[in-house]
Image (spheres, rainbow, N blue to C red):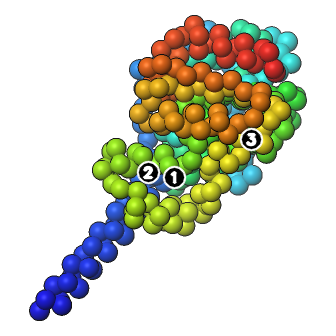
Amino acid sequence: MMKKIIISIIVIMMFAYVGSAWFFSSKILELGITECDVEHFVFCGDPSTQAIVFEDVSFETIDGFTIPAWFMPAENAKHAVLLVHGRTASRHEGMRYAKAIIDAGYSVLAIDLRHPRQDPAILSTMGYHEKKDVVAALDYLEKIKGFSSIGVMGFSMGASTSIIVMAEDQRIKVGVFSGGYANSMDVLSEQAKVIYGLPRYPLMPLVELFFEWRGNLDSKETDPENYIAQISPRPIYIMHGTADTTVDFSHGERLFSAAKEPKQFWQAEGGAHTRLWQLNKEKAESSVVEFFSRYL
C-alpha cells in the first residue's frame, strides 16, 4: 500500500513539474495582443500626432513574414536610425525619441517585430527569430532608401536582439540600447520567481528545453552578453534604470562590462524599465542625439 502511495506521489510530482515547465514556456512563446499603453509609450497615435511626416511601409523577412513600419524622413538626411521595440510592445515604443532624432538630421525607421498582431500563430522567441526582422529593416534602409550609415536604438528585447544583430552586421555603425537583458534565461528565471514564485532549479532547464523545441531555436543565441564584445570598435551606449523590475539593473551592468570601447553607460537612478524618457526627458533625448551625432 505504501509503495503505491509513494509511486502515486512521484507521478503527481512529475506531472506537476512537466506541466509547470510547459506552462511557463507557453508564457514566453505566446504573447497576447495588448493596446498601446500611454503611460509607458506616451505617443500611441501614428507619427502625425507629433507633426512628423511619415510613410506607412512594409517589407519581407527571409522567412516570409511581413514587417510593418513607419519611415520618417529628415530633410537631406545622409544617415538613418532604426528603432526596435521590446517583447510585448510595438513600434510606438521608440516614438518618444523619434522627433528629437529627426530634428537632429537623421531619418528614422520604426518597425513592428513579428507578433500575433500580424498572425496569431507567431511565437515570441526572445530575439532568436526576431533578428531576421531587424536584418530585413537594415536591408530596406540600405536597398530601398539608400542609406549605408545606419544607427540602431533598441528597447528591452529589442535592445538585446539589436546587440546580437549589430555584432554580426557591419551596416549598424552605432548602437543605443535601453533596458536590455544580458542573458535570456537569466531574465526569464528572475521573472518566473517574481511573478509566479517559481524556482530556477529544477524548473528552468526543462522550460528552456520546451522553449527551444517549441520555438525551433537555440537559446544560447539569444544571449547578447556573449556577442557584445564583437561590436567594437563601433560605439555603443547602454541606458538602464536602477528601479527596473522587469530586467534587473544588473543586466545593464553586465552588458557594459562585457562590451569593449568605445562605450557609454547611463545609470539612471530611479528609472523604470525603458522609461528613462519619462524620468528625465531632456537628458534622455539630448544624450541619445549627442551620441548619434558624435559617432554616426
Q: In the picture, residue 19 is in which quadrant?
A: bottom left
Give the answer, above or below, for where 2 lies relative to 43: below
Residue 282 % position (x, y): 57, 7
Disc 1 crowd rating (10 Å Cα; few below 14, some 14-19, many 20+) is many
> Which of the two discs, 3 and 2, labels the residue nearer the N terminus?
2
Q: Secondary structure at mark 1?
A: helix
Q: Which residue, as the protein is rendered here, is positioned at the far left?
A: 1
Measure the alpha-carbon separation of dots 1 and 3.
Answer: 20 Å
Residue 23 % position (x, y): 37, 60
Which residue is depicted at the point 40% across and 45% down?
191
Left-right relation of 245 to 197: right
For label 3, the residue is 229
Residue 119 % position (x, y): 54, 49
> Which of the two discs, 1 and 3, labels the residue nearer the N terminus?
1
Q: CB under 8 Å between callouts 1 and 2? A: yes
Q: Secondary structure at mark 2?
A: helix
- Which labelled disc corresponds to residue 185? 1
Residue kind at label 2, given as amino acid type: Ser
Residue 91 % position (x, y): 58, 30
Q: In the picture, residue 60 is in which quadrant?
A: top right
Q: CB under 8 Å between callouts 1 and 3? A: no
